[in-house]
Amino acid sequence: MAQPWKGEFPGGKVEPGEDEAEAIVREIREELDLEIEVVARLDPVEYDYPDFRIRLIPFTARLTGGSLRLAEHTDARWVSTAELKQLDWAPADLPIVERLCAAESD
């Protein structure tokens, strides 16, 4: 189910032979032309859309290089944790936003 014009965190599928952290590093490189270093793996999120189930494995990461170039998206934004809730997120990404905001307030 496509979520046009909804905010979503970048990422994609884990390819054969790579682990989850390697997959997010590769996806960020492919989608945004940025280099990252994974800092932490967060708890996965499972969400049921009407016609499929998605499992998201979020990570926090540190930017280490590159220059933002959009290969697959129409927009990208750097926002503070406080600004996350102001964006219109895809439903599957909302639990991640909630967790990030809650962790920030701890």
Image: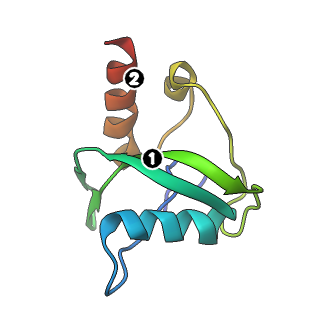
For the residue pair 13 and 90, the one nearer the viewer reads as: 13
Instruction: Please report the residue visible at 69 percent of the width from the left and 65 percent of the height from the top.
Output: 33
Question: Any mark on residue 101, and which?
Answer: 2
Q: Quadrant of the C terminus?
A: top left
> Where is 72 relative to 100, above or below?
below
For the residue pair 54 and 56, the one nearer the viewer reads as: 56
> Where is 1 relative to 93, above or below?
below
Instruction: Please report the residue visible at 30 percent of the width from the left and 55 percent of the height from the top.
Output: 57
For the residue pair 55 and 22, the one nearer the viewer reads as: 22
- Helix or strand or loop: what does disc 2 sit on? helix
Please state the horizontal and vertical placement of residue 42, each as a whole percent of the image.
Answer: 28, 44
Quick check: 2 left or right of 65?
left
Please state the horizontal and vertical placement of residue 75, each as a whole percent of the image.
Answer: 72, 51
Please state the horizontal and vertical placement of residue 98, each as a whole percent of the image.
Answer: 35, 28
Image quadrant in which you'd find residue 96: top left
- Helix or strand or loop: what does disc 1 sit on? loop
Quick check: 54 left or right of 33?
left
